Image (cartoon, helix red, strand yellow):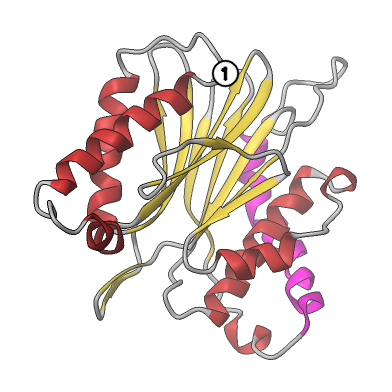
């Protein structure tokens, strides 16, 4: 399960530049499930560098097909100049079409089965001329669609994450509160969906493209026993602990 939240905060000209001025956040679990086998130390948030700008990518679904997409995407991105807000999205569409062609070689007569066997989804986050952009992309539609809300979610537990985050007044929250809420949402998904697990990961991309920080272990304490069967208020109670643990990384910006 993967979830992404994107925020853009105006820069304070009287303050020292900070990683919190204009940022996009991504958060995810770190577990993949293949058949009955699980692995809980997979990096699901990565940085892909275009010729002159970084893009942050989170993925969910079949690990092998997602990794092959990232290889294709990174190769194309390295040769591409960032000239339009849709540039990374268009390159991602080209990349996933190439991936689908590769996968189709073994499923000439049954493309629907191919989609089921190798299904994967992606969230792309980046800035263009100071404007944040979040796109979702999946193997089935092969379309990179811009998200017009404050957050996007993909993966098997996306419905749980959407339930937690829909209706939240993000504009009234500070960046650190948003960080805490996103990690709490991941923890809630881990409680209610056995396909989610492992440590929570967090990625931060700054407006100036100078820092794309991937933190593989933001919060390792298991809150499952406390969270199970309780209200969302219990999860929000953990935001202070989450923010406290994350704050040293934020200050490094």
Does 235 appear in magenta?
yes
Given residues 48 and 243, the one toward you in this image is 48
Q: Is residue 160 left or right of residue 34?
A: right
Dot 1 falls on a residue whose secondary structure is loop
Q: Measuring from the top left, give residue 208's x and y in whole percent.
A: 61, 18
Question: Is 232 situated above or below 103?
Answer: below
Q: Is residue 166 above or below residue 73?
A: below
Count of residue discs: 1
Quarter of the C terminus within the rendering: top right
Is residue 73 visible in the rendered image? The answer is: yes
The residue labelled by disc 1 is 85
Classify 198 as above or below 213.
Answer: below
Residue at 34 percent across and 21 percent down: it is 77
Q: Residue 35: horizontal and vertical position, in percent? A: 24, 76
What is the x, y in percent for residue 204? 57, 38
Q: Residue at x 38, y 31 (%)?
A: 93
Question: Which secondary structure dominates the residues rendered in magenta?
Answer: helix
């Amino acid at each position: 399960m993967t979830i992404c939240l994107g925020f853009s905060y105006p820069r304070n000209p009287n303050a020292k530049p900070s990683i919190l001025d204009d940022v996009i956040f991504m958060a995810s679990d770190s577990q993949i499930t293949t058949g009955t086998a699980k692995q809980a130390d997979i990096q699901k948030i990565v940085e892909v560098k275009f010729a002159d700008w970084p893009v942050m990518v989170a993925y969910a679904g079949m690990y092998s097909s997602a990794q092959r997409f990232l290889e294709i995407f990174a190769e194309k991105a390295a040769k591409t100049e960032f000239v339009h807000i849709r540039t990374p999205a268009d390159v991602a569409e080209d990349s996933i079409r190439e991936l689908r062609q590769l996968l189709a070689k073994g499923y000439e007569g049954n493309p629907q089965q191919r989609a089921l066997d190798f299904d994967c989804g992606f969230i792309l986050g980046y800035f263009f001329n100071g404007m944040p952009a979040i796109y979702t992309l999946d193997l089935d539609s092969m379309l990179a669609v811009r998200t017009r809300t404050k957050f996007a979610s993909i993966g098997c537990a996306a419905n749980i994450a959407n339930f937690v985050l829909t209706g939240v007044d993000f504009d009234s929250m500070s960046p650190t509160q948003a960080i805490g809420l996103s990690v709490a949402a991941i923890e809630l998904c881990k409680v209610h969906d056995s396909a989610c697990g492992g440590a929570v990961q967090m990625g931060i991309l700054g407006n100036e493209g100078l820092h794309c920080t991937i933190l593989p272990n933001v919060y390792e304490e298991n809150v499952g026993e406390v969270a199970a069967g309780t209200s969302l208020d219990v999860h929000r109670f953990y935001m202070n602990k989450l923010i406290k643990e994350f704050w040293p990384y934020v200050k490094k910006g």
